Image (cartoon, rainbow, N blue to C red):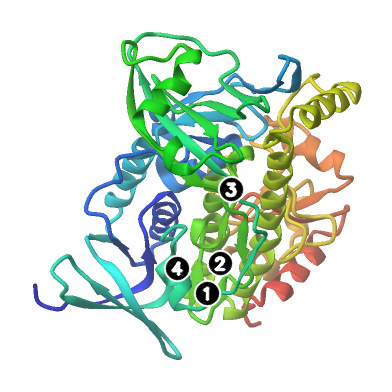
Amino acid sequence: MASLTSRADVLVVGCGPSGAVLASLLARRGHRVLVLERHREVFGLPRATSFDGETARLLAAAGVGAGLARISVPATGYQWRGAAGDVLLDIAFGDTGRYGWPDANTMHQPALEELLGAAVAARPTVEVRRGLTVVGLEQGDNEVTAIAEDETGATHTFRAGWLVGCDGANSVVAELAAVPVTDLGFSFEWLLCDVELQEPREFVPTNLQLCDPARPTTLVGSGRDRRRWEFMCLPGESAAELDTTETAWRLLAPHGVTPENAKLLRSGVYRSHARWAQQWRQGRVLVAGDAAHLMPPFAGQGMCSGIRDVSNLAWKLDLVLGGRVAERLLDTYTLERRGHTKAAVLASVKLGRVICVTDPAAAADRDAAIVANGGGRRTGPPAATPLTTGLLQPGGGDVLGAGRLDDLIATGFVLITTEKPEAIGESERATLAGLGGTIVHIGPDAADRGYADDLRERGAASMLVRPDYHVYGTAAAGGANALLAGFFERLGAHRPSG
């Protein structure tokens, strides 16, 4: 093959869920996106097995909402059980949660990637080139250049205004850009067994954590007719002796899973990690997804965090590429996502320290303490974690609940206000419109009372919502113009003259 040269607005390295969502979001805003992926085909084995309701909403904003029900199954709940069978944790999931989607959804990751791939292929400004591995990066004042090799060893050159590494845990982009990392050193090995069930079978609850010191075990749904079992590697036990097909079937047998009623799709030992990038932007190179963070699987937030990364980044890149704000806006990407992801990693590690107990006496003490403190009571899932720093007013950062305006909000900023339309100044209107924003007036007879209730609960008359559904801030009656003006100043938005 002859060497190829191509120029795009954004070059995305990696076409997994994070890379595909970013490409779709940018293309829906009219930008030319080039995606480089080293695999020729969608990777056929699952990695992630679930996504939460907030993530489903973000996936819908990327254009695949109509297909999610086809590739996922709502989960009924998540339980922890101690060695004696005591219920230590019991979370019930609803089919329609606060973000407009099932609280938890199990899925076969290749099916999700195929759905996202179809959405990306339908966008005329996206090009996906497979079979190319990035081997070099060069940054200039106005562009970044990527050097990639194909299977024959031939090199190809690609240029873009910005490059985003979504290329997974062993990210070449993060390595080439010398991205600094904080690693907590929290690591355990587990045997992962993906199974396709040959007979109908109901699992209640869908997801179960057996906190048994004899062998901590995880059971989770993985889409229709598929499940995953994960068995912890015990102290003194080598990964090599655990990592055999015979061992997989031996450990699955007590759960009623045998070669006669199930197909073992994959078994293998993996090591969990707990780390995050210190800087998510190095010049014109940024990282997202597993390239920016890794966490133990106990909270099921690895892939979800990657989708949040690119949902945060896409609208910021859009504004910068359009010349509507200064490049410094991209520095808020590190501030917002690093803190948010650090909290998710620490929460996953905390759960892991509870689960990965193999001393029987310590496990018994743990179970007794949890039960004595009210553990095992059924609860609903927690609200989405708010942002705590970045482009926010003090007190802002929470995720707005779903409502009839979701399709509208997905297109950009929205000012939701009970102020009369004429109360918003022309300059504020023009600047918000230039950012792709919309003003929505909530009258006393509004058909959807949800947002009116949101405003009342916040003691506010106006609320500014970002494209990623996080609330920037609120204002009392008469304060909408000041809310917008302060936002424009912090954003560095170019105001219309006159």
Query: Which residue extends farthest bottom?
Result: 141
Q: Position of residue 494 (x, y in %)?
A: 62, 79
- Residue 316: mark: 2
Q: Position of residue 291 (x, y in %)?
A: 49, 62
Hey, what amino acid is under mark 4?
Val
Tell me whether the residue at label 2 lies in contact with that at label 1, contact meaning CB atoms closer than 8 angstroms.
yes
Hey, what amino acid is under mark 3?
Ile
Q: Is residue 348 left or right of residue 109?
A: right
Q: Which residue is mark 1?
A: 320
Reading the chain from its start, which is encountered first: label 3 or label 2?
A: 2
Q: Nearer the viewer, mark 1 or mark 4?
A: 4
Q: CA distance from mark 3 to mark 4?
A: 25 Å
Hey, what amino acid is under mark 1?
Val
The residue closer to the viewer here, 148 or 390, is 148
Reading the chain from its start, which is encountered first: label 3 or label 4?
A: 4
Reading the chain from its start, which is encountered first: label 3 or label 1?
A: 1
- Residue 164: mark: 4
The residue closer to the viewer here, 482 or 299, is 299
Which part of the image, by quadrant, shows the N terminus? bottom left
Q: CA distance from mark 3 to mark 2?
A: 15 Å
Q: CA distance from mark 4 to mark 2?
A: 13 Å
In this picture, is 88 found above or below 169? above
The quarter holding residue 382 reads top right
**Residue at position x 67%, y 59% in the image:** 184
Tell me whether the residue at label 3 lies in contact with that at label 2, contact meaning CB atoms closer than 8 angstroms.
no
